[in-house]
Image (cartoon, rainbow, N blue to C red):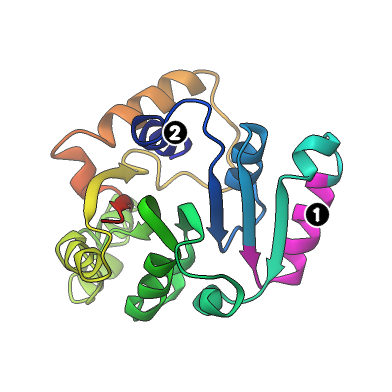
Amino acid sequence: MARQLEEQIVGRFPVGRRLRVLDVGMGRGAQALRLARAGHQVTGVEQDPVMIAAVREEFAGEPEGIRERMRIVEGDGRDTGVHFRPGSFDVVLCHGVLLQVEEPDALLAGLGRMLAPGGLLSLLVRNGDAPAMRAGLSGDWAGALEAFSTVSYGLKRLTSTLAGIGAPLHTWYGVRVFTDTAADDADLPGDLEALLAAEERAGRTDPYRGVAALLHLCGVRG
């Protein structure tokens, strides 16, 4: 996903431009820190105090110049309008937050308002078009059958939502096409680079990306 995001940033903004980035639901700050190291001004929004403490500890080991480019706001991603003025950011990230939100329209509308004209919105969401894949690949047949009746946001509905908030879908990728059933604590394989290359290729190639566990959607503010 980091490679996909980098591809979109490089393709949309002039090389060397320092971007204003908002990371809503920044978690442990992996993407925020990577972008701050690249020279961008990053604001992270997070409501979990445990995550915030972990992020601050991680940032504390960075050089002063990088720490100065980082700001953390404790709050809910649905309250961006309380903290920031419309159009304040060139890039808005919301990775994983929508996995826990049943009706994301209001949250997405708020994120769209944060974007400056031409700004990039990067979302990581569950693939509502293939809810049975993980259970089926794990041999959980009852779970797979149950998932077929699950109503979830798919690419078509999300495309419509992004158009409605003024940040139409520009491109999309699949994430975790081959590796979603791997255990969270699994050891990294020796051929990690080959694994990442295969995932990256599948994530941009039909029909593979259509059955990925997650979708990475990139919208652009008109």
**Image point (44%, 33%), residue name:** 6
36 w.r.t. 89: above or below: above
Q: Pointer 2: what residue?
A: 6
Q: Nearer the viewer, residue 156 or 66?
A: 66
> Percent from the top left, x then y, of residue 214?
34, 53
Q: Residue at image x 34%, y 25%?
A: 198
Q: Where residue 219 sits in the image (x, y, percent)?
A: 29, 53
Residue 62 visible in rendering? no
Residue visible at 35% across and 36% down in the picture: 12
Looking at the image, residue 41 sits to the left or right of residue 118; the answer is right
Image quarter hosting the N terminus: top left
In the rendered structure, find residue 56 and report the number of the disc placed on it: 1
Residue name at image x 42 percent, y 19 percent: 194
50 falls in the magenta region? yes
Q: Position of residue 10 (x, y in %)?
A: 41, 30
Mainly helix, strand or loop, the magenta region? helix
Q: Which residues are magenta?
A: 45-59
182 or 53: nearer the eye?
53
Under mark 1, the amino acid is Arg
Say whether residue 8 is left or right of residue 19.
left
Query: Does dot 1 land on a helix, a strand or a loop?
Result: helix
Label 2, residues with CA under 10 Å away: few <14, some 14-19, many ≥20:
few
- Chain-order first, disc 2 or disc 1: 2
Residue type for callout 2:
Glu
Q: Nearer the viewer, residue 150 or 17?
A: 17
* Label at residue 4: none
Quadrant housing the C terminus: bottom left
Please check the rendered image and state whether residue 158 is part of the magenta-colored stretch, yes or no: no
Tag 1: Cα neighbours inside 10 Å, few (<14), some, or many (≥20)? some
Note whether 139 is above or below 24 in the view shown.
above
Which corner quadrant of the image does residue 146 belong to?
A: bottom left
